[in-house]
Image: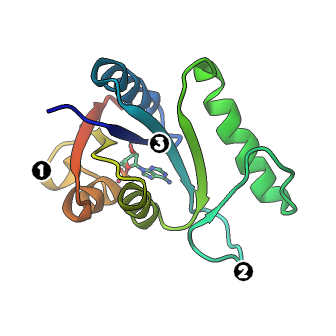
Amino acid sequence: MSYRHILAAIDYSKNCKSVLQKAIFLATQQQAILSVMHVVDNLPLSGTAYGTEIDLGADVANPLLELEKSLFIEELAEFNDIDMARNLVWGVPKQEIIHYADREAVDLILVGSHGRHGLELILGSTANAVLHHAHCDVLAVRISD
Ligand code: AMP
């Protein structure tokens, strides 16, 4: 049984690219479709519905969102030769990750896990919520701080 659609959820924390690198490795090995997603959750955007997808190919009216778009494109620049669906969405990370996975028939989600001490700290709140609420497999990739 192989995975058919793998999603890497990335924040911009230090070493978070290892989540994407692991997803690329697995997608290549499994011959799966690959998607990457970042959820913008640090901007107050009144009048914008949660789940709004940011078009990477068009100008964005809001300058803060435009900046987020540039950051995302820059973050992924080193992976430009990799075939993957790039998704930048405004909303609540755990909700958007799970919603995308359901909608796009993702069967494996990769999230990062920081190796902090104490069992309850091993998975952060987003990773923990995805693990408990996703309808597919979830792989927590250990990220060294
Ligand atoms: P946290 O639960 O905040 O410690 O984050 C753990 C993991 O959840 C990260 O390594 C990412 O894989 C994922 N994640 C957290 N925040 C976001 C976000 N804004 N967009 C996409 N993925 C995220």
Q: Which comes before the other along the chain, label 3 or label 1? A: 3
The part of the image, by quadrant, that contains residue 99 is bottom left
Per the image, the residue denoted by label 1 is: 119
For label 3, being within 8 Å of ligand 1 is answered yes
- In-image side of 9 versus 12 (left or right): left
- Quarter holding the C terminus is top left
Amino acid at circle 1: Leu
Identify the residue shown where x is 70% and y is 40%: 71
Per the image, the residue denoted by label 2 is: 46
Give residue 122's position: percent from left, percent from top.
20, 46
- In-image side of 87 versus 116 (left or right): right
Amino acid at circle 3: Ile
Per the image, the residue denoted by label 3 is: 10
The answer to whether mark 3 and mark 1 are in CB contact below 8 A is no
- In-image side of 143 versus 16 (left or right): left
Q: Nearer the viewer, mark 2 or mark 1?
A: 2
Q: Which comes before the other along the chain, label 3 or label 2? A: 3
Mark 3 crowdedness (10 Å alpha carbons): few <14, some 14-19, many ≥20: many
Measured in 3D between alpha carbons, the distance from the residue under mark 2 to the one under mark 1, in whole angstroms, is 37 Å
